[in-house]
Image (spheres, grey):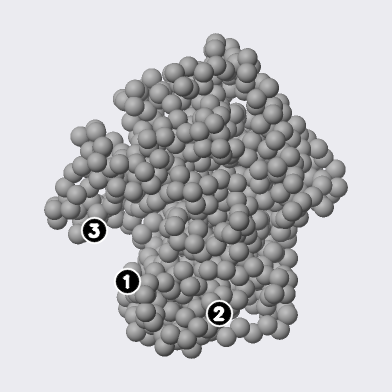
Amino acid sequence: MERIMKRALAMACSALCALSMTIQPALAEQDGRLAFNRPDDAHAFVAGLMDREAWHNGGREQGEHGEHRRHRFHLTHAQLVQLVRKKIKYVFVLYQENRSFDSYFGTFPGADGLYSQPAAKTPGFVQTLVNTDGTVGTISPFRIGPKQYAWDTDDIDHSHARIAAKMDVVTGKPLMDKFAVTEELKYSPTGDPSLKAKQFGELAMAYEDCDTVPFLWRYADRFVLFDHVFQDITGPSTPGNLSIFAAQTGLTQWALHPNEAFSTFDPATGPTATNPHGLKVTEAGAGEPVMDDNDPLWGSPLDPNKTPNVPVNAGDFGGSAYTYGVQLNQTYASIAINTMGRNATAITRHDSDAAGDLADIHDDISYLTRSGHKQVNWGWYEEGYDHEPTDPANPVDANGTHASYITHHNGPQYFGYVANNPDERANLHGLGDLFTALKGGTLPAAGGVFYVKGGFQNIFGLTPDNPVAAARANFLGDDDHPAYSDAQISEAMVAKAVNAIAKSKYWKHAAIIITWDDSEGDYDHVPPPVIVNGPDKQVFKFGPRVPLILISPYARTHEVDHQDGSQSSVVKFVDELFGLTPLALLPDELKGRADGEKEFGEANIGPADALTPYVGDLMGAFDPARLTGRAAPLPASYAMIPNKAIMSLPQYGGNGCQADHIVPTDVAKGIRTSVPSDFNPLPSTNPGV
């Protein structure tokens, strides 16, 4: 870790020195802000930084564990990227919800897991948990599986504040030792803990393996599993769904508009509305960078367009006595912007609120228009966004269209330049539309990047295998989020998508990335690097690890890649694959980064797809032998799972490890963990057990 820190500091210094040397003639202070002197300055400046970034990408971010593989490549990084560009045209990001690496893959062979080193050297392996009689006990990670119906668990706290508390950062170093007690204290902040509080504390330390999620382990075993990918920020789902689309959640917007800072933003300055239950809809909790799950402005009751262009789940505002808060318009660059290329000016002309949506990316648009780069296609396919195959023909309420839609999981919908532009809105779809496009072969011939998300229900008619009636009724979701999604139904959705891609004409040019938006607040033992603190002075970047699996006919097999990364690594991969200007190197984002360092003393205020340490590019997942033709591409059948297995719950009869021929490390080492006698996977759904 010390070696990584030294390398990162050197890299950051180098980048900042380059920035200061290059920025001086191109930028000048105007009205307290940095601005480019001439239009040509932005183009020359960014081109120079891209050259430096490309040079560094040759090996600077392989991570402490990945450097030993460099000699196996027999290719420079530039050669590897060029070969991948020739083979891969379609990137499918199957983006699931809320699982830490250790909770799903902590016993995966070869991974940096729970039993990779002695307990005494594993951060947070033994944690404090208070018993219901007030005595103080301890708890360590323990396996749950089919006997506990581990595919259905309640949701533990993964808010920004509590993830930071669970990580327990002391003098800049996360100790990773307060997951259990932080969760317990949420439900019993004073006095002896209730049984429910203790059970939630226990749930934070539980982990699953291939008997619970056999399909995910099968993919990880056959292809490439990344075990050092951290959640981009310490926060819940919305930030994760912004990060994978924009490589940030509003750091540069915070720098450019300090009055919009999270934790100090005053919702009284914004609009309000009232839902049918008399509750106010406001921007309470909003602010930059985004750290909570407020709904997008666009589609909400506060949407200034009185006829909203984008949908919202009818239950978010007025379907119940609960109502969501509303987030600010997000105005920084994202994949929607840098994929526009030379068409940026033409596309953004169709924005119905250009003044509100484009002011913070004016120079980005000018730069991209002048770049001459071809436009790259993108799409976001989220369950419930539009009419799904399982919806009634003429739904009239929240039980029909949009009932499965999780509004705050749609990253692009937060950006006005998407929601208010018909050209950009056309990239937003429902989940069923993906399967239709794959079967019909109607995806763009030039390729692109396509995000895939489940929702509150599933479009396959699956019901949880669980004796608890409330679980069978409430855990129909397929995006892997505890409290409403069943883990096996969720991996069934993933398997259905992988099969559909494998069967399609797109397989031979495909890269499939399976990853998760946040760690759920579940225990993970690897301390994340701390490189940014937010407006509340708490740790912001990075959070605990999440799994990431890469599948491709050109991928390595049976590989665990230890390269450091985050959700921004997906953006970085897309940048490199399609030759896009990284978001971090666009002119307006560079100005925001410079302002952030000047105003807040933070060196990494900006998109993390360049200039930011610990963010790899995932290119190491590809096999040079397959790319160069010395080995055959992997056949589609190698990635596929029989539909009968997908649709049968529990999968493989609860014997997934045996079916996958994988021996988890705890089993291999003869380690038998004990499930606490009062453990309950559903402390809220099925209390008192």
Q: Is residue 308 left or right of residue 448?
A: left
Q: Which mark is residue 473?
A: 1
Q: Is residue 282 left or right of residue 552?
A: left
Dot 3 alpha-carbon crowd within 10 angstroms: few under 14, some 14 to 19, many 20 or more: few
**How far apart are the alpha carbons under marks 2 and 3?**
35 Å
Q: Quadrant of residue 277?
A: bottom left
> Quadrant where the N terminus lies?
bottom right
2 or 3: mark nearer the eye: 2
Foreground pick, 599 / 469: 599
Residue ID for mark 3 = 322
Determine contact: label 1, label 2, CB under 8 Å: no
> Quadrant where the C terminus lies?
bottom left
Q: Position of residue 271 (x, y in %)?
A: 23, 38
Q: Position of residue 454 (x, y in %)?
A: 42, 55
Q: Which residue is drawn at 50% across and 78% down?
A: 129
**How far apart are the alpha carbons under marks 1 and 3?**
20 Å
Q: Where is residue 33 in the image (x, y as percent from the top left)?
A: 48, 22
The amino acid type, in three-letter code, at marker 2 is: Ile
Q: Which sits earlier in the primary sequence, circle 1 or circle 3? A: 3
1 or 3: mark nearer the eye: 3
Q: Which secondary structure, mark 2?
A: strand
Q: Can residue 324 be seen in this view?
A: yes
Q: Which residue is drawn at 55% across and 62% down?
A: 168
Q: Residue at x 60, y 16 (%)?
A: 26
The amino acid type, in three-letter code, at marker 3 is: Tyr
Foreground pick, 597 / 42: 597
Determine contact: label 1, label 3, CB under 8 Å: no
Residue ID for mark 2 = 139
Q: Where is residue 60 in the image (x, y as percent from the top left)?
A: 74, 41
Foreground pick, 603 / 249: 603
Q: In this view, does 669 lie to the left or right of 335?
A: right
